[in-house]
Amino acid sequence: MITSATNKQVKYVRSLYRRRVRNREKRFIAEGTRLVEEALKAPAAPASLFYTPDMAESPHGIRLLDAAGSKGVECCQVTPEIMALMTDTVTPQGMLAVVPFPHLSIPEHPRLILILDGIRDPGNLGTILRTAAAAGVDEVLTLPGTVDVYAPKVVRAGMGAHFRVPIGACGRGADMQAKLEGYQVLLATATEGVPHWETDWSIPTALIVGGETKGVGETASHWATSRVRIPMAKKVESLNVASATAVLLFEALRQATCKAG
């Protein structure tokens, strides 16, 4: 059992709370039984797993530890005090894993791409990723200015989305513009454009969603071939960015489902 805060493995986990270290190591933290379970289902096994004595005695913990052992994951027991040092939640669940960045396959011809420009709130980003996975988005791309997708708060809010939908970073240059060639590129706005239910989502589409305060940057707005909006009741100006994205993506899913059926 690890009991010392100076243990090198404890220090390593703590270092992964820094974006620079995550990018260098290509690893992030999956905290809690739900995320550990998702990580164990992923093609690439976690690099290591840490758990408390209470977790080792619980039915769920036993199942997860058995699954980790079958995949050859290094499992280390730690005291509750050390677990508290290794997490950034108020009430840790007693289990976390160090996980490699997922490398999920992207369809040869993605039907729906989500581009995020300047999403700064970790909770919003995580919720958007979770929604993207549920709505069948083929690829999520983040532009500079968006919070790190592997930040712990984003990962927790994503609830396993990182293991289900391909997520990548992109720039604002010619390569990105070339990638969008042949796509209907929709820019989500609060007041302009076609209502989302009148938009044809059945054709290859890239949806651009901007940040909570500044919205979409000038470069990304130039990529748009059309604008889309969500009609709302009078006296309501806008929705939370995560809520608005969910409305748009599920309309895309609805149309795709109706067409397939």
Image: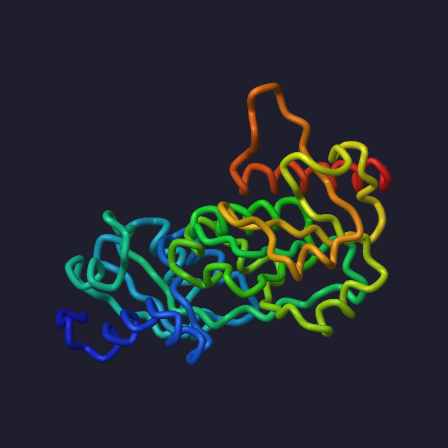
Residue displayed at 58% across by 45% down: 131
At 45% from the left edge and 75% from the top edge, which residue is drawn?
A: 23
Image-based side of 135 in relation to 117, left or right: right
Q: Is 244 located above or below residue 147 in the figure?
A: above
* Screen quadrant of the C terminus: top right
Q: Name the residue at the top extreme.
A: 234
- Residue ID at (77%, 60%): 110
Q: From what the image shows, is residue 178 above or below residue 259? A: below
Instruction: Using residue 114 as the reference point, say whether residue 256 is left or right of it.
Output: right
Of residues 193 and 31, which is closer to you in this image?
A: 193
Q: Position of residue 171 (x, y in %)?
A: 62, 70
Quadrant of the image occupied by residue 95: bottom left
Q: Position of residue 47 (x, y in %)?
A: 41, 74
Quadrant for the N terminus in the image: bottom left
Furthest toward the front, the residue is 218
- Residue 36: x %, y % from top left: 42, 58
The quadrant where residue 257 appears: top right
Which sits in the foreground, 12 or 78?
Answer: 12
> Residue 183 vs residue 5: left or right?
right
Q: Looking at this view, is 83 or 20 the one in front? A: 20
Taking 238 as reference, is 165 above or below it? below
